Structure formats: structure tokens, C-alpha cells
Image (cartoon, helix red, strand yellow):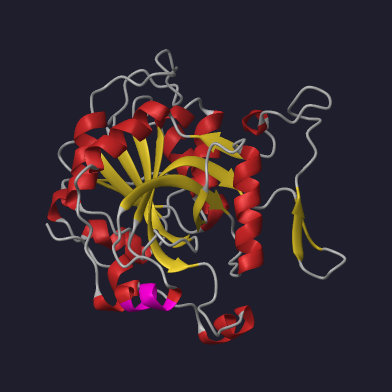
């Protein structure tokens, strides 16, 4: 599950609940229903059972259960209107589930905050310990563009064309590509709220995670940071792919963000919300469960044969309540 402490979750929710959002004040009701059965304050999106069950174990989320068409799991909610569901893994499952929620006639999500909460692969960085949590400021696409072997038979990447989303000959704003969904900047107000809410929070750690940190020669002290996440449905590992991820994030954000973590759902979440004018209601919070390069002395092929090295005990641990 997403390794995030109670103070982050409750702190973020206590700040955002009931506050108006800047940038979408005049948003129309995307469900087309004037008075819905329920108006969730927050919907937390998890991807797979281990993340989902971190929430189902909490009795407070047994207050109300809502079934909706197109679901992978129901919405389970507490008495404050904070709900959780499981979308399934990958961009497609995420987008389908989010769309089903937005279009459900028993829900009104015109003021709802959507929070993606899950684990992620991390960048090989001295300061990014396993178990660290990233509050993401950008959601970036991995898949579009051209991934290929160059003449030196190493992995390479070239950006997609830009004729369909920018002025002729001008690729200056990748966030304007609504067909390929290349880059989304998180609403600065929600991002700032989340950062403030998490200030001073101490993250748990485990001996196993520290051992892996030492293997990669990175920090052994997890912390909360801000960074960009890149979304892709294929599992990749290696320094060449990490360099490509860094290049993609740098290009699409004009150097304003740095690649810090990779996962499989966030782009599907926010692209679906964008179609209904709700992209400014989205927040992505990711906990680092593994590092996306092989440890010293190992090759990429060896990792695929034996399995990646995860801080599973830390990443899947339910925070103490």
C-alpha cells in the first residue's frame, strides 16, 4: 500500500475539505444531476488489493458503501464523506474507473478532491530513500514519443510531433496536447495545501529498507518531497530508461520539474478528469517501494529473472492508527 502516515492523510483532508478551489470556481456539474445522492469530499484512488486493503482495514470506512456501474471495487466512505476505491492497475483501468465515478448519477463530484494514493518506483538519487513519499507536482506521459534503439544499439527517445496542439513550428506548451495527454501540472493550491499538511510528519522505516538503501548507496532516512511522476504501463528498469524519463520530464515541463517516481495510473486519472473540467481537483501521492535501476553487480536481465528488490514490508505496511 501507499506508505503515508495518518497525519498526511488527515492533514491534507482537513485542509481541502470545504475550501473552494482556485481555477475551477464556475465548474458545471459533470453528472448532469442537480441534486445527487452523495457529494464526496474526497475520493482516494488505489490500484491493487494491497493498496486497497490498507483502507478497508480501517473501521471508519465502513460507514457507507456505494456501488456504481463500471466499478472494479465499490466506494467505501467514512462519515465525513471521504471515500476510497480500487481502480485496477494501469492508465486504462484508472481512466475507466474515474469516468464511471464522474458520470454516476448517484454521485455529484463537482467539488470532490481526487487523490491517487499508491506505491511507485523511485529514481536513483542519493536523497531519495526507500519509503520516501512524493507529493507530485506534475503528471507526465512515458508512452508517447518514439522509443527506439539508436545506431549504437542503446535505448533512445524522441518527442512526438506537435502540429496538433501548438502553433505551427512551436512545441512550447506540451500541456496543450489534449489528444496525446503528455503533461499535466497539478493545481498549485492543492499541491501547496498537501505540502503544508505534511510538514513535520515523520515516516516509518524498516531494517530491510535500510539494507536496500545501503545497497544502492542512497539515504536511509525516508522523507516527504515534491517531484514529478511519469506514467507508463510497461515495467522498465535500467539507467538508460531512467535517463529517458529524466529527459521526458525536463522537456515537457521546460525544466521546471525533475523526474522522481514512476507508476501506472496517474495519467489515466487526470486525463479522464480533464475531459470533465476536473483536472484541478487532482492530487497524486506516491510512496517509493523500489529503485528503477539494478543494484550494483546486477544486470537488467538478471533482475527480470529473479525479481526486483522491493521494500515490501515498508511499502505495504498499514500506518499505525
Viewed as shown, does residue 262 lie left or right of 209? Answer: right
Question: Is 167 rendered above or below residue 70?
Answer: above
Residue at 82% from the left image edge and 70% from the top image edge: 153
Front-most of 42 and 151? 151
Q: Position of residue 117 (x, y in %)?
A: 36, 51
Residue at 24% from the left image edge and 43% from the top image edge: 198
- The quadrant of the image that shows the C terminus is bottom left
Q: Where is residue 228 in the image (x, y as percent from the top left)?
A: 49, 46
Front-most of 65 and 4? 4
Viewed as shown, does residue 122 lie left or right of 55? Answer: right
| Residue 81 visible (yes or no) | no
Front-most of 179 and 210? 210
In reply to whether residue 165 is colored magenta, the answer given is no
Q: How many marks?
A: 0
Residue range highlighted in magenta: 211-215
Q: Where is residue 271 in the image (x, y as percent from the top left)?
A: 55, 38
Question: Is 242 rendered above or below residue 255?
Answer: below
Q: Position of residue 86 (x, y in %)?
A: 38, 54
Query: Hey, which quadrant is residue 301 in on the image?
Result: bottom right
- The quadrant of the image that shows the N terminus is bottom left
Residue at 60% from the left image edge and 67% from the top image edge: 236
The kind of secondary structure the magenta stretch mainly shows is: helix
Residue at 50% from the left image edge and 78% from the top image edge: 295
Query: Hey, which quadrant is residue 211 in on the image?
Result: bottom left
Front-most of 211 and 2? 211
| Residue 296 visible (yes or no) | yes
The outermost residue toward the top is 26
Amino acid at each position: 500500500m501507499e506508505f503515508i502516515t495518518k497525519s498526511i492523510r488527515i492533514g491534507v483532508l482537513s485542509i481541502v475539505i470545504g475550501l473552494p478551489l482556485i481555477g475551477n470556481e464556475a465548474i458545471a456539474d459533470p453528472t448532469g444531476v442537480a441534486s445527487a445522492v452523495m457529494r464526496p469530499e474526497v475520493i482516494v484512488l488505489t490500484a491493487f488489493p494491497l493498496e486497497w486493503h490498507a483502507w478497508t482495514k480501517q473501521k471508519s470506512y465502513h460507514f457507507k458503501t456505494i456501488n456504481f456501474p463500471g466499478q472494479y471495487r465499490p466506494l467505501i466512505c467514512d462519515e465525513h464523506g471521504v471515500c476510497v476505491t480500487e481502480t485496477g492497475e494501469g492508465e486504462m483501468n484508472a481512466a475507466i474507473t474515474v469516468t464511471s465515478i464522474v458520470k454516476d448519477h448517484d454521485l455529484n463530484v463537482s467539488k470532490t478532491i481526487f487523490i491517487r494514493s499508491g506505491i511507485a518506483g523511485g529514481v536513483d538519487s542519493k536523497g531519495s530513500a526507500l519509503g520516501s513519499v512524493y507529493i507530485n507536482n506534475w503528471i507526465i506521459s512515458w508512452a508517447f514519443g518514439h522509443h527506439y534503439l539508436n545506431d549504437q544499439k542503446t535505448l533512445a527517445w524522441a518527442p512526438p510531433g506537435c502540429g496538433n496542439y501548438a502553433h505551427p513550428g512551436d512545441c512550447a506548451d506540451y500541456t496543450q496536447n489534449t489528444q496525446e495527454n503528455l503533461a499535466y501540472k497539478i493545481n498549485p493550491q492543492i499541491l501547496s495545501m498537501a505540502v503544508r499538511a505534511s510538514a513535520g510528519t515523520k515516516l516509518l522505516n524498516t531494517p530491510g529498507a535500510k539494507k536496500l538503501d545501503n545497497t544502492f548507496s542512497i539515504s536511509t532516512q525516508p522523507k516527504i518531497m515534491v517531484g514529478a511522476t511519469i506514467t507508463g504501463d510497461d515495467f522498465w528498469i535500467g539507467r538508460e530508461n531512467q535517463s529517458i524519463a529524466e529527459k521526458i520530464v525536463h522537456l515537457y515541463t521546460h525544466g521546471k520539474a525533475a523526474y522522481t517516481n514512476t507508476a501506472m495510473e496517474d495519467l489515466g486519472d487526470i486525463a479522464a478528469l480533464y475531459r470533465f473540467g476536473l483536472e484541478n481537483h487532482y492530487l497524486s501521492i506516491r510512496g517509493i517501494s523500489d529503485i528503477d535501476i539494478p543494484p550494483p553487480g546486477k544486470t537488467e536481465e538478471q533482475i527480470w529473472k529473479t525479481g526486483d528488490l522491493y521494500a515490501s514490508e515498508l511499502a505495504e505496511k498499514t500506518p499505525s492508527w
